[in-house]
Image (cartoon, rainbow, N blue to C red):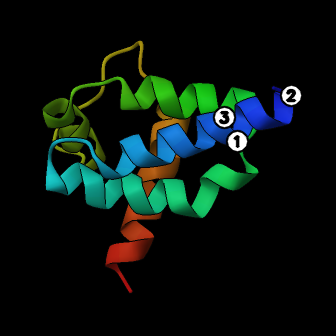
Amino acid sequence: MTAGEDIAIRRKRLRYRAWHRGTKEMDLILGPFADANIERYGAEELDRLEALMNEEDPPLLKWVMRQEEPPEHVDRVFLEQVIADHQARISK
């Protein structure tokens, strides 16, 4: 398996995880985000997405909806990209 195949498999796995979170609300936030961005992401961005997706759905949803501040360990720059993507979709 080549590095290109590895990253293709990783993208496919992360896209699946984005659409199958366990809560419909997060599916509808992370699924479209992954669809729109994942193919252009390299290993570093995939790491950032995976770290965010490792968070539990209830607090993650509160962060995306700006109901709570995320803890310090959360990549806020990347989270802001997810939030901006979601807000752009719901404002259409």
**Label 2 belongs to which residue?**
2
Q: Earlier in the sequence, mark 1 or mark 3?
A: 1
Q: Residue shown at 57%/28% (left/top)?
A: 48
Quadrant housing residue 70: top left
**Label 1 belongs to which residue?**
8
* Three-letter residue code for mark 3: Glu
Find the distance from the CA under tag 2 to the CA under tag 3: 19 Å
Compared across the picture, whether 72 is left or right of 47 comes to left
Mark 1 or 3: in front is 1
Find the distance from the CA under tag 1 to the CA under tag 3: 13 Å
Quadrant housing residue 57: top left
In the displayed structure, 32 sits above or below 16; it is below
* Three-letter residue code for mark 1: Ala
Mark 3 Cα shell of 10 Å, populated few (<14), some (14-19), many (≥20): some
**Label 3 belongs to which residue?**
45
Compared across the picture, whether 78 is left or right of 88 comes to right
Tell me if I can see residue 49 in this picture.
yes
Task: Pick the quarter of the image with the C terminus.
Answer: bottom left
